[in-house]
Image (cartoon, helix red, strand yellow):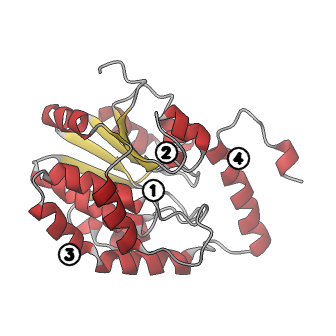
Amino acid sequence: KLLPDLPLDNTPAENSTYVLWRAHEILDCHDPFAAKKQHYNDVALSMYPDMMAIVQASDSSLDAAVKVAAAGNIIDLGIVDRADVNLAAILQEVLTEGLAVDEIELLEERLGRASRVLYLVDNAGEIAFDKVLIEELHARGLDVTVVVKGAPILNDATMEDAVAVGIDRTSRVVSNGSAMIGTDLKTCSSEFLRQFEAADLIISKGQANFETLNETPAPIFFILKAKCSEVGRELGGAMGDVVAVLNRRWTDL
């Protein structure tokens, strides 16, 4: 009888978290998606050399790297309705068709002013796609801190996933101290909040991070696939669109 008690003014990410925590209790399982997470880490990591080659051959390495990272956001075990996902086909589709809402030029401009970037990853598997964009940021001389979840929730990336794809070898990786879907600042650690406040630019992956941060007046660049019509409309597109947009609540536009 959990659902009737969930506040309607909570974000979808927050209420989904409470449902999943209850499922963990019923199943007596700390990480029900562990096997799937490892599978997608392995598959995506096997594609990493090809993804890097695409970026290196592109006329705009940032444009290509953002699109690679965006393609990775298709991997969401809370949304997909099939047993597996063809990651190579998804990547090719995004690279060919582009983004429905594309503000990569604004990102390029903001990166030119930045020195410290906070990168909020979303899902396991997807984190190998993020590695491509993170490497592009390093190539620009930026100090990048990668943020993972504090404990397993759905298929969100944790420290174990960052280590599995090797992000810890090139970047500082920190936990946000929370096991909530998205980034609910009320539940995050004081150390993470210090990093959040100190960042010149925050790159945020996925719809749940958008749902929990889009009212925050911070320098956030959102990269995601809109997985419901409401979020699609709010981003200036439609359900299913892949977008890369600057936070409209940030006053320093």
Q: Pointer 3: residues within 10 angstroms few (<14), some, or many (20+)?
A: few
| 98 or 39: nearer the viewer | 98
Quadrant location, the C terminus = top left
Q: Amino acid at mark 4?
A: Asn
Q: Pointer 4: residues within 10 angstroms few (<14), some, or many (20+)?
A: some
Q: Amino acid at mark 1?
A: Asp
Location of residue 231 by image quarter: top right
Rendered image: mark on residue 49: 3
**Is label 4 in contact with label 2 (beta carbons under 8 Å)?**
no
Residue marked by disc 4: 15
The mark closer to the camera, 4 or 3, is 3
Instruction: Give me the residue at 54% from left, 66% from top.
Output: 155
- Sequence-wise first label, 4 or 2: 4
Q: Amino acid at mark 3?
A: Pro
Q: CA distance from mark 4 to mark 3?
A: 38 Å
Location of residue 160 by image quarter: bottom left
- Sequence-wise first label, 3 or 2: 3
Residue reaching furthest to the right: 1
Image side of residue 2 versus residue 24, left or right: right
Rendered image: mark on residue 122: 1
**Is label 1 in contact with label 3 (beta carbons under 8 Å)?**
no
Rendered image: mark on residue 209: 2
Q: CA distance from mark 4 to mark 2?
A: 14 Å
Q: Amino acid at mark 2?
A: Asn
- Sequence-wise first label, 4 or 3: 4
In this view, 130 is above or below 247: below
